[in-house]
Image (cartoon, grey):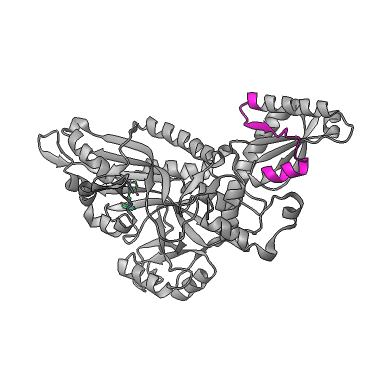
Amino acid sequence: MAGGGEKKSKANATGGGKKKEVKKETGLGLSYKKDENFGEWYSEVVVNGEMIEYYDISGCYIIRPWAMSIWETMQKFFDAEIKKMKIQNCYFPLFVSPTVLQKEKDHIEGFAPEVAWVTKSGESDLEVPIAIRPTSETVMYPYYSKWIRGHRDLPLKLNQWCNVVRWEFSNPTPFIRSREFLWQEGHTAFATKSEADDEILELYRRIYEEFLAVPVIKGKKSELEKFAGGLYTTTVEAFIPNTGRGIQGATSHCLGQNFSKMFEIIFENEKGEKAMAWQNSWAYTTRTIGVMVMVHGDDKGLVLPPRVASVQVIVVPVPYKDADTQGIFDACTATVETLCEAGICANMDSRDNYSPGWKYSHWEMKGVPLRIEIGPKDLAKNQVRAVRRDNGAKVDLPRSSLVERIKELLDEIQESLFVAAKQRRDACIQIVKTWDEFVEALGQRKMILAPWCDEEEVEKDVKARTKGEMGAAKTLCSPLEQPEIPEGTLCFASGKPAKRWSYWGRSY
Ligand code: 87F
């Protein structure tokens, strides 16, 4: 099918009886409801909200300006923060030679089916096929080996913003699981044992909570779920109440000396002895945007937190019959100017081929946090009407104190999106002590906090015992902030003494 993606056409074909009234009236609106068909709702909302266009290669998506600007906002924040930490940006090639890729063979083994290869140039076969990076350890670390000679070369702290390709086979979803995605990957090397980077994990938390208004839990991955190449993995975990699934939001690995052994990242320490570097790596991806859409979006479309919205305020003129149309348009123009001068991202929708009602639906679909309407009555009273996207609340504001009030409103929206999302997430958290309670909570799509013996075999057993149509349960993380474990607390699954609290559930 030309230019069409798998999901989009399906959405159009199977819309059936669930079409909403608004769609008939305006040609806008969504055919699926978030609570009724979450998967189709999500596909529709990212397309109709103009974030994504489907592409003719499955699992690949066009990121449109409306979504790219969100990525750029997060990138600007994160990039400035890591520069304060003396982390430097660089760029390594997209292509990996097979010999270098093989170097990491122990843990590449499980990942091998996902590696994409270039085998031809034009009509002729390449002498040696070339892999496309799924991650850049094997690309970067040979050069770390070359550049790190003495202890004065350390620490080496590099980051790159780039795309990676992982040829996923299960259920491609825009932002959440795509075959090509954007990320930053940080790779640091130190002279002494480094811990997985707490500072970076805190930046990831801030991206989710302060920018995307999505609550996350900082935690440590289990042995089964960690990156096999490292000593341990930390994570920020989000939760999608509608599907009852946890989702890894970003990750930071303590690699120990595993890679420096493999790649011979060896330096002479202060005593003149040979030593191996200690390493961390960490990443967050465009998945962040998908999580935000899933958490905040509603039946009218996207709901963007003000801090990441490229348009924070949309001003819509509401002319009426023979009222002073020019006066209304001038008031709109002046309002946009005033707001922009104050650093608020405001725009006017001055198109004359659409009605105000159509424009309301359009900007609601795109998730703009605040709408300002100016009609004849507002003009006469020297006021504007502001309408919140998150809760539909309407308030009339005098033009004299507009900037302060709009700033307050945007802050309030940002805050209340987070509070509401946290309430919904927390309502899904269930503390369980026994297997029966666990099974019941899983059936209710909960994010389960349970005392655990922290044994790999027991997690494998839980997976096996919960296998089914919806997918097995696994650990999401052990929260870094651990509730107390009273003496004698037993593991919910094995009955052995519990070592720590862990979150469990189905996941993306
Ligand atoms: C897919 C294909 C080949 C994940 C893969 O998390 C290799 C891999 O090594 C692979 N999928 N991984 C693990 C990535 C680990 C690590 N890399 C740097 C990160 C953070 C950034």
> Is residue 4 shown to the viewer in this render?
yes
Residue stretch rendered in magenta on the structure: 340-363
Give the residue displayed 69% in from the left and 52% down from the top. Answer: 29
In this picture, is 359 found above or below 442? above
Q: Is residue 78 left or right of residue 264?
A: right
**Magenta run includes residue 199:** no
Given residues 497 and 304, the one toward you in this image is: 304
Give the residue displayed 66% in from the left and 58% down from the top. Answer: 31
**Magenta run includes residue 343:** yes
Given residues 158 and 504, the one toward you in this image is: 158
Residue 40 horizontal/vertical position (percent): 58, 59
Residue 363 horizontal/vertical position (percent): 67, 42
Q: Is residue 347 left or right of residue 201?
A: right
Q: Quadrant of the C terminus?
A: bottom left
Q: Is residue 204 left or right of residue 112?
A: right
Give the residue displayed 33% in from the left and 49% down from the top. Answer: 134
Given residues 289 and 127, the one toward you in this image is: 127
Residue 339 horizontal/vertical position (percent): 67, 27
Name of the residue lying farthest toward the left: 272
In this picture, is 61 found above or below 477? above
**Image mark count:** 0
> Is residue 148 shown to the viewer in this render?
no
In this picture, is 254 found above or below 224? above
Residue 108 horizontal/vertical position (percent): 27, 55
